[in-house]
């Protein structure tokens, strides 16, 4: 019986820690913003965000490293920029911001749209709201429910005996 209780507690703890890791990765990605979400080949795009102090931030264009790595400052904030590749074709591309901690690496993929110069009316890229992921605590509700359910089962089984 004691083995079952220990096993249930360990499984609940592992599930809770896994969910906490997902929430932290989502929260790091939700803090990443781009100066624009579309532009022309050759344009410079600034990426800003928050991480842990000393984290390394790398930027990838369709899986290829672009720009210089940035390091999060003492407060955790960082800013880096990249140039939209000259040969980039019009359409949607994936820009991945990779945040490297000592223990974990978080990849935050975002869509960036390349506009053809021949189609554009002006020479400046269209302004867009910063790209942000929604911050939700929804994932914590099921995790809490699992832990409470497990503890409730243990309590009621003990009272029956």
Image (cartoon, helix red, strand yellow):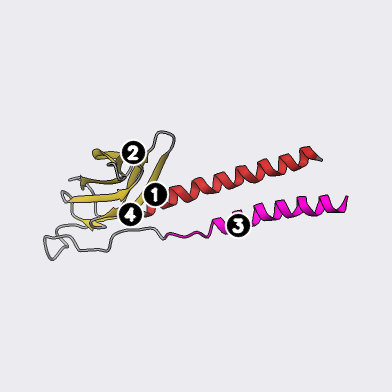
Magenta span: 135-161
Q: Residue at x 17, y 45 (%)?
A: 86
Q: Which of label 4 and label 2 is nearer to you?
A: 2
- Residue 7's place in the image compared with 119, above or below, is above
User: Does the magenta segment cover residue 4?
Assistant: no
State if disc 1 and disc 4 touch (CB < 8 Å): no
As measured in the structure, the alpha-carbon distance from the residue carrying label 1 to the one carrying label 3 is 21 Å
- Label 2, label 3: how many angstroms apart (C-alpha)? 30 Å
Task: Tell me the residue that label 4 is attached to.
Answer: 111
Question: What residue do we see at 71% from left, 51% from top?
Answer: 150
Dot placed on the residue nearer the N-terminal end, 4 or 1: 1
At which x and y percent is residue 152?
73, 55
Task: Give the SS element for disc 3.
Answer: helix
Q: Which residue is mark 2?
A: 55
The residue under label 1 is: 28
User: How many neighbours does mark 2 have within 10 angstroms: few (below 14), some (14-19), or many (20 or more)?
Assistant: many
Q: Looking at the image, do the residues carrying marks 1 and 3 touch, with CB atoms under 8 Å apart?
A: no
Separation (CA) of disc 1 from disc 2 = 12 Å
């Amino acid at each position: 019986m004691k083995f079952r209780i220990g096993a249930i507690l360990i499984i609940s703890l592992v599930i809770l820690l896994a969910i906490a890791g997902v929430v932290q990765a989502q929260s790091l990605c939700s803090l990443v913003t781009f100066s624009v979400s579309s532009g022309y080949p050759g344009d410079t795009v600034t990426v800003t965000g928050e991480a842990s102090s000393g984290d390394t931030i790398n930027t990838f264009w369709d899986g290829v490293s672009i720009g210089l790595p940035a390091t999060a400052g003492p407060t955790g904030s960082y800013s880096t920029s990249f140039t939209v590749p000259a040969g980039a074709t019009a359409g949607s591309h994936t820009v991945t911001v990779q945040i490297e901690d000592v223990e974990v690496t978080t990849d935050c993929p975002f869509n960036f749209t390349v506009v053809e110069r021949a189609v554009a009316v002006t020479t400046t890229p269209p302004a867009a709201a910063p790209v942000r992921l929604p911050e939700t605590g929804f994932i914590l509700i099921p995790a809490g429910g699992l832990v409470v359910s497990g503890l409730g089962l243990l309590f009621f089984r003990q009272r029956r005996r």
